[in-house]
Amino acid sequence: MATPLQLPMASSIHSTTSTRTRSRVFNKTLCSAAKIPIPPINPKDPFLSKLASVAAKSPEAFLNRPSNSESPPYLDLFDSPKLMATPAQVERSVSYNEHRPRRPPPDLPSLLLHGRIVYIGMPLVPAVTELVIAELMYLQWMDPKEPIYLYINSTGTTRDDGETVGMETEGFAIYDAMMQLKNEIHTVAVGAAIGHACLLLASGTKGKRFMMPHAKAMIQQPRVPSSGLMPASDVLIRAKEVITNRDTLVELLAKHTGNSKETVAQVMRRPYYMDSTKAKQFGVIDKILWRGQEQIMADVAAPEEWDKNAGVKVMNGM
């Protein structure tokens, strides 16, 4: 009686083991055959090119970085081939750190995401919007308390020559996603922030909106897409939609810059370019990331000391 009962059990165990083995082999083959889609990257972007060269020369520099949330990460790429001494430490949850990879991610978008950076380096076309919103949601899911760094070098929904390449809703979609997040969002302009990209720059957390010294910001009215051979009624419908988008853009810029709607609408009548200083005065940013500027200004002698060293005597009453 015992022997016939044991044989089917052993056969069943052997069959189950073989099935699991075949399942693992099939899943492994399927995963290796699947192609992971590559997000859009601008190959001529100077920020990504610099980041790629640093990652190739010293990948260990991206690991075990100390923490300082006051300094956006990776900005020292513009000063030296070494990374910042105090960038923000990412993915601090204990459950993740136990299994944290010991090597940097293999591609640049993953490397930036590893540093909690969402980088917009192209115009706001649907593919870029999809990737940016997905990364924002992923970083909030990873840690809803740590800040997210939004680096911007984009011409918005137009190209640099003014031709429309995306609908205005692309910029509004990213803006709405930013407003729904629980994390602080530190915005950094590292090149150009034009149109809707300027709105994204201004909509960061107050006090955490930065700009590189030679970056440019520009606000302008939305443009009517090419109408082609459309009937006059359709052209009128499109024009009304553009006016609605313009009013929405004026309202949001006024909200985040602290200016009145009338002031924003007045300067937006024509393209309004701003360097870092003018952008700070207009309320688009809070701080210019000029490394070492504070120490330089602190070392400047007072006017009285300059006069004394130059041998200039100041007469009373003059």
Image: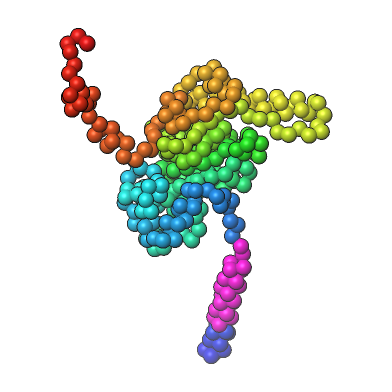
Above/below status of 310 relative to 114 = above
* The N terminus lies in quadrant: bottom right
Its colouring scheme is rainbow
Relative to 167, 117 lies left or right: left
Above/below status of 218 relative to 117 = above
> Which of these two is toward me, 93 or 255?
255
* Identity of the residue drawn at 42% across and 51% down: 115
Q: Position of residue 79 (x, y in %)?
A: 37, 47
* Identity of the residue drawn at 40% across and 31% down: 286
Q: Position of residue 299 (x, y in %)?
A: 24, 34
Outermost residue to the front: 311
> Which of these two is toward me, 107 or 31?
107
* Identity of the residue drawn at 73% across and 34% down: 226
Which span of residues is magenta-colored? 12-35
Number of numbered tags placed on the structure image? 0
* Identity of the residue drawn at 28% across and 36% down: 296
Residue 23 visible within the image: no
Residue 37 on the magenta segment: no
Which quarter of the picture shows residue 289?
top left
Residue 37 visible within the image: yes
Q: Position of residue 128 (x, y in %)?
A: 59, 45
* The C terminus lies in quadrant: top left
Outermost residue to the top: 317
Magenta part, dominant SS: helix
Q: Position of residue 279 (x, y in %)?
A: 45, 29
> Which of these two is toward me, 147 or 228?
228
Above/below status of 262 relative to 221 = above
Relative to 252, 95 lies left or right: left
